[in-house]
Image (cartoon, rainbow, N blue to C red):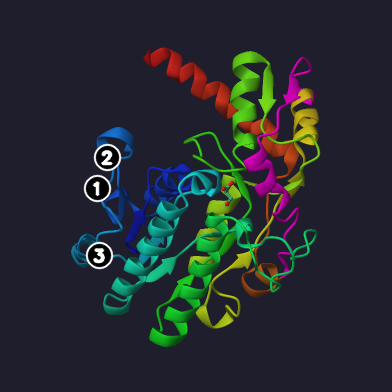
């Protein structure tokens, strides 16, 4: 059975990915780690541990003891927080990645390292954004993502580390909140709709961005990890996409199910500038051709599952108060 180690397992992606992997592989085969104490975030049945990926000895020890076949390296600081603490974002995003890549040289395992729409910036075509095009992002988060893609390519070609990755669009889910991102509005809006019937959006109404329901994102990561390595010409950063919308279009889609929902706009200059520099739609033809990527969640389906999921979570939270 495949043994899997996750870093950053307390985050938006890690929480759902750990449960999906534990359900398929058996909880004992999935080690969920995060810099935060598992008592604060771990709800699953399998093992969980504290792991600070900036500590190379701790990374080495964890990998040597658990002997994972696959590692999903999800620990990172997102775009908006990265602009508040650029030096910290560089240190964490790049420093943790190189520690993981170094360990993978001596403990052979397959790595998944996420990149992002943020790896593009001014100068790149925005709709569609090709798989291979100019990458000159002007956010620290984006700079760490481009550096990460290059590092992964380097460790693959120089040391034969089997590392793979996708460029995620904004990810939408209700299990665990995203933190400090620019696309987070597309999650917050559902919580506000159900709590207040109203949302004040930090991006302007016409800001079109590339988005994806997290279940599609998790399936993408897992399918890429299972794909035959020899087919992966663009192995470390496949564009993937599922849907593209603006805040106004998302609000319209919510209103189809909640006719009284209202939205107002109060753009935050920092996050608006970040969003304006990012792709509206990634061209995902390389991922489709090389490992069969295909999204399943449309905007309508995403809105329906989010309203249902957030409502269920709210009533569970009420019961536990
Ligand atoms: N969702 C991320 C962010 O907004 C982009 O990868 O920072």
First in sequence: mark 3 vs mark 1 = 1
Q: How far across and down, in percent of the image, does residue 220 sit?
A: 57, 58
Question: Under 8 Å from ligand 1: the CB of mark 2?
Answer: no
Q: How far across and down, in percent of the image, does residue 135 sit?
A: 65, 68
Look at mark 1 in the image and give the residue it sits on. 50
Q: Are marks 1 and 2 in contact (CB under 8 Å)?
A: yes
In the image, 245 versus 287, the foreground residue is: 245
In the image, 160 versus 209, the foreground residue is: 209
Look at mark 2 in the image and give the residue it sits on. 38
Q: Which residues are magenta?
A: 256-285
Residue 69 appearing in the image: no
Q: CA distance from mark 1 to mark 2?
A: 7 Å
Q: How far across and down, in percent of the image, does residue 196 sit?
A: 63, 14
- Check the picture and name the quadrant holding the N terminus: bottom left
- Check the picture and name the quadrant holding the C terminus: top left
Secondary element under disc 3, as helix, strand or loop, is helix
Q: CA distance from mark 3 to mark 2?
A: 20 Å
């Amino acid at each position: 059975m495949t043994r899997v180690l996750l870093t950053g397992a307390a985050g938006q992606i890690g929480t759902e990915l750990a449960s999906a992997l534990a359900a398929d592989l058996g909880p004992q085969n999935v080690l969920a780690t995060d810099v935060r104490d598992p008592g604060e975030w771990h709800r699953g049945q399998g093992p969980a541990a504290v792991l600070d990926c900036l500590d190379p000895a701790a990374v080495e020890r964890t990998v040597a003891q658990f002997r994972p076949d696959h590692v999903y390296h999800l620990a990172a600081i997102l775009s908006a927080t990265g602009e508040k603490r650029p030096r910290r974002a560089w240190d964490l995003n790049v420093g943790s990645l190189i520690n993981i890549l170094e360990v993978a040289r001596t403990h052979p395992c397959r790595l998944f390292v996420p990149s992002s729409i943020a790896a593009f910036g001014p100068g790149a075509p925005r709709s569609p954004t090709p798989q291979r095009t100019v990458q000159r992002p002007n956010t620290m988060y984006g700079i760490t993502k481009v550096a990460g893609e290059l590092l992964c390519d380097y460790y693959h070609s120089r040391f034969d580390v089997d590392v793979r990755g996708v460029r995620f669009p904004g990810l939408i889910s209700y299990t665990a909140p995203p933190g400090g991102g620019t696309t987070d509005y597309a999650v917050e809006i559902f919580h506000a709709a159900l709590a207040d019937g109203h949302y004040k959006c930090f991006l302007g109404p016409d800001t079109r961005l590339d988005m994806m329901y997290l279940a599609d994102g998790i399936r993408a990561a897992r399918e890429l990890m299972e794909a035959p390595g020899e087919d992966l010409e663009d192995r470390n950063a496949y564009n993937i996409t599922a849907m593209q919308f603006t805040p106004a279009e998302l609000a319209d889609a919510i209103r189809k199910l909640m006719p009284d929902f209202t939205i107002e706009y109060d753009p935050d200059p920092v996050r608006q500038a970040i969003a304006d520099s990012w792709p509206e739609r990634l061209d995902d033809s390389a991922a489709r051709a090389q490992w069969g990527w295909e999204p399943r969640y449309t905007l309508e389906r995403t809105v329906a599952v989010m309203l249902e999921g957030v409502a269920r979570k709210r009533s569970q939270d009420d019961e536990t108060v």
